[in-house]
Amino acid sequence: MNSNPRQITLLKVVQELGSVTVEQLAEKLGVTLQTVRRDVQRMAETGQLTRFHGGVRVPSSTTENIGHQQRVNLNSDAKTRIARSVAAAVPNDCSLILNIGTTTEAIARALLRHSGLRVITNNLNVASILSANPNSEVIVVGGVVRGRDQGIVGEAAVDFIRQFKVDIALIGISGIEADGSLRDYDYREVKVSQTILTHAREVWLAADQSKFNRPAMVEVGTIAQIDRLFTDAPPPAPFAALLAEAQVQLHIAQ
């Protein structure tokens, strides 16, 4: 494809942010929504970009996630809104498990004013954030530390979590596919997440809109295992029907 200067700039913006809405692109480029949509359509047809409901991202790999810092910046405003919505629903004086992910890290920041929480996590970033709350207790899972994002994985982590049964598991995910499967990239991380799903009285999933129809290699579980989904926009088809069928409570962060 012979890209014009505007399309080259558009591609650089998406590569920098990882994912961006059409409205954000129009604002950054100083052009109309119609112009951005036309450019995005052409660039998606040539495989330079991948479209999702309301936006565009770099083409996805099913085998490897993007870098941690890039994920921190990716849809950061949406993650903040989702985190506030989750925190508003979490009562004081309860037990939680938070897994690996930048969305759960945002949730940890939103929980800093809570009291009486007992939090188990395999995410050293979450542990570092919540350890600043003197009114809650943080328990760090044992296992192998994954240097690129401070996640703790492996069989030791699985065995550690099996000791507990918490009130709420607050989990993030890399992708939700149209068959209702929840997916991630590292099978060692997935083993830990699967254990978390079965050792909580309720499971709350926090996922921004870019996670819908995002492919990843390893299945963590299914939508039917979730009690509540917190997201930032109404899910596209067929997810609304899947959530209704599974009787999942849907929370749209404002």
Image (tube, rainbow, N blue to C red):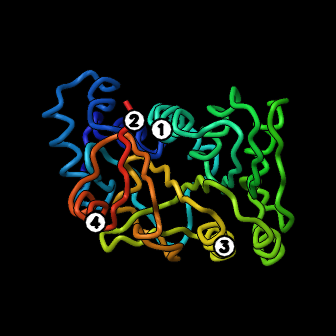
Observer-nearest of 91 and 39: 91
Q: Which residue is mark 1?
A: 82
Amino acid found under the numbered disc labelled 2: Ala
Q: How many marks?
A: 4
Q: Is the C-beta separation of discs 4 and 2 under 8 Å? A: no
How far apart marks 3 and 4 lie (CA) works out to 23 Å
Q: Is the C-beta separation of discs 1 and 2 under 8 Å? A: yes
Observer-nearest of 56 and 238: 238
| Position in image of residue 31 (x %, y %) | 21, 25
Other-residue count near label 1 (Cα within 10 Å), few / some / many at <14 / 14–19 / ≥20: many
Q: Residue at x 61, y 46 (%)?
A: 104
Amino acid found under the numbered disc labelled 4: Leu
Where 187 sits versus 99, above or below?
Answer: below
How far apart marks 1 and 3 lie (CA) works out to 24 Å
Q: Quadrant of the C terminus?
A: top left
How far apart marks 4 and 1 lie (CA) works out to 20 Å
Q: Secondary structure at mark 1?
A: helix
How far apart marks 4 and 2 lie (CA) works out to 19 Å
Query: Quick check: 124 left or right of 195?
Result: right
Q: Which residue is mark 3?
A: 195
Q: Which mark is residue 242?
A: 4
| Position in image of residue 29 (x %, y %) | 30, 26
Q: Which residue is mark 2?
A: 253
How far apart marks 2 and 3 lie (CA) works out to 27 Å
Label 2 or label 3, whichever comes before in sequence order: 3
Query: Quick check: 225 left or right of 247?
Result: right
Res 134 → quadrant:
top right
Label 1 or label 3, whichever comes before in sequence order: 1
Amino acid found under the numbered disc labelled 3: Thr
Label 4 or label 1, whichever comes before in sequence order: 1
How far apart marks 1 and 2 lie (CA) works out to 5 Å
